């Protein structure tokens, strides 16, 4: 019963690459481009129209581009007007609004709610129930764990939006609320269930509600006796570009290193 | 490809107003009334039957009423036996159980889980991932931010349910847990990631885990230098009934002011 | 309009018991066994294939077994390779991954995200938005309230997974983050919005962020004046096996008491 194109609806100007497979009961609206070898699974809505669709007769769906080799799991909704690089993955029941730009090899877990108007780098991994507010900027190799919310309104309700910035290799622990406009440095670590109301420099570790600075991740063995885990790329490589070569060798080969 | 009635299932005694549009793969069960110019988008279930439906042969679906000009976004499930005023909106993947009553111009964000047996006023806005326990009572113009849960059982598990009460113009920040039976006054503000185990009087601001009273919202500039943001209706009007006239003028014209 | 088999897709080797009813737009993949009198509601995906399905031509879906009298509510996704006892229930929009084993009479609320590779006992009740990490072990009669996450990686990101263990009759309050490898004893109680970074012995009560031990649940009236609520089975029996006889009588009759 593999991909028999049952109850699929395709809009106009839908450009499917080679070997794209589409699951049952999936709807793809106008002006969607899907790269080679991508899979859109069952019950998805791809290119969901923006609000103007419902009342403007001249509405034209903005372009949505999903890279090659992507895997969009079932019951995912992706709005028109966004761009995702190759090897993009979603879990189930994901919602991604317009003007989201993500690089290659990103993975957004089940029940992620990406509010749009945000920039996400390459090789980012968000686990389940991650809520990314508008104007968030997230660089490469960032890990975000379940039930994290990146807020953006310092004086609610208002139009005065200040997004969160998370630099490369940083991690945000489960159950954390990040306050509007907070900046998190490279390789920084936010512990679980933190209320992050302070900026973190590169390599800083903070945790607590409200957050307290604990120290430098490079100096702390944390939960593993006598063995330093951070910077984490030395110890974790599954799915990362340094999986074959190791992190130090890979890093030395990067052009802007 | 706008609203072509593809794979729609309508029960008996479904009353659709003028110009109601229904998306693909949507199911509407018996005894549902939808007002003029409303839109029910794709993959929704409207009038979801109560549990008795599965085992009582004489089951009759209680009435569900959705007001005119409402917009129910895709993958939303609304149980039978509820009532929503005009200009009601939902995000995606919303679930609303029976005996929910909401006024006009309410907006329930994506992944809202409204447990039923609750009353919600007019012009309330819930962002994503808001969980409203049974017996909650929420008045007009209340804003609730992501990952807020209104609990209701002080001695779990029990049948001794005590709902949360939130008065008009109050706001509850992201990631907040409100304990059973708590009362939040008019224009009160609950900061992000608060564990709210105390009642708040009108205009009080509290934050922290557990909550601490910080002060009166009218006296505090908070995050904007030398400019007072609260009461917020003076500074925010998008979609509110005072959008044209301004809050003070609108308020003076209200009959019960 | 009760269960008319509209737009249903059944894979090969799907074994349906007597009087199984399947809702509209539901897909059941290969090698699924569903017990007598079970109901699978609308828009579900049952036996969702594992990742190898997408690229291994010889992929065979592992067996999924759902017990008799189960009720799987709409928009639920259950992966292949799991086993659920009789009287299993899910809410809406649930996701359950492979290698999940749950006993009889379990109930997983709406938006539960069960990550797989976990063991769950009998008569467990999870409310909405519960996130169960891999390697979690949960015994009988455990109650978990909304927005609880059981984490499992003490040094993220890593492959060094340490699941949470929750013993029988324990309860975990709303908004709680449980850290990796934590053990919660029998009849223990975790208050709402707790960051649980300590193990709890049987009957201990802890709350706070970070958690503090408060005392023994058997000695504390908590929120009910002059009346002890715990151990809770003496005061709560709805849907429990002691509903007819009372807890003490039922307990005395258990073989391993």
Image (cartoon, coloured by chain):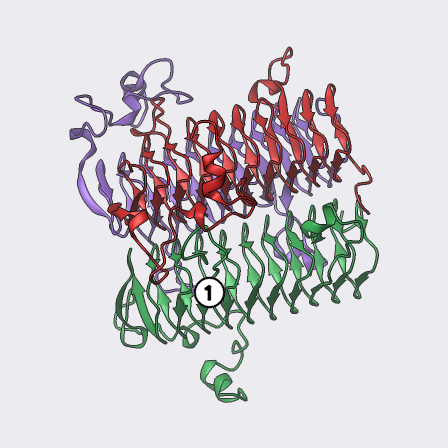
Chain colours: A purple, B green, C red
Question: Which quarter shows the N terminus of chain A?
Answer: top right
Q: Which residue is mark 1?
A: B143
Residue A105: image location, x then y, percent: 47, 28
Using the rendered view, name the quadrant where residue A41 is placed: top right
Chain label for disc 1: B
Vertical arrangement, residue B235 with respect to residue A76, above or below: below
Q: Quadrant of residue C164?
A: top left
Residue closer to the observer: B176 or B173:
B176
Name above or below for residue B68 compared with residue C194. below
Q: How far across and how far down the image is residue B252, in percent?
A: 48, 89
The answer to whether residue B30 is left or right of residue B253 is right
Q: Position of residue B184 (x, y in %)?
A: 40, 69
Using the rendered image of the protein, determine whether residue A5 is visible from the camera's viewpoint: no
- Counting the numbered discs, the total is 1
Specify the farthest residue to the top. Answer: C58
Residue drawn at x 30%, y 46% is: C205
């Amino acid at each position: 019963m593999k991909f028999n194109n049952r109850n699929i609806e395709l809009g106009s100007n839908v450009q499917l690459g080679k070997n794209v497979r589409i699951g049952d009961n999936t709807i793809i609206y106008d002006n969607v481009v899907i790269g080679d070898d991508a899979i859109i699974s069952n019950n998805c809505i791809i290119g969901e129209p923006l609000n103007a669709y419902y009342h403007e007769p001249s509405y034209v769906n903005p372009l949505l581009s999903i890279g090659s080799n992507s895997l969009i799991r079932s019951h995912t909704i992706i709005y028109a007007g966004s761009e995702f690089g190759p090897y993009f993955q979603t879990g189930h029941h994901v919602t991604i609004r317009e003007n989201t730009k993500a690089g290659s090899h990103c993975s957004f877990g089940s029940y992620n709610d990406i509010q749009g108007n945000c920039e996400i780098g390459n090789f980012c991994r968000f686990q389940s129930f991650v809520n990314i507010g508008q104007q968030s900027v997230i660089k490469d190799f960032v890990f975000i764990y379940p039930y994290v919310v990146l807020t953006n309104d310092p004086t609610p309700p208002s139009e005065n939006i200040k997004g969160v910035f998370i630099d490369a290799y940083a991690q945000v622990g489960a159950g954390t609320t990040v306050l509007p406009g907070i900046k998190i440095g490279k390789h920084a670590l936010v512990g679980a269930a933190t209320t992050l109301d302070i900026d973190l420099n590169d390599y800083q570790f903070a945790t607590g509600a409200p957050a307290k600075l604990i120290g430098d991740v490079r100096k702390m063995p944390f939960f593993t006796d006598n063995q330093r885990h951070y910077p984490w790329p030395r110890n974790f490589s599954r799915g990362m570009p340094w999986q074959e070569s190791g992190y130090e060798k890979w890093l030395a080969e990067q052009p802007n290193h």
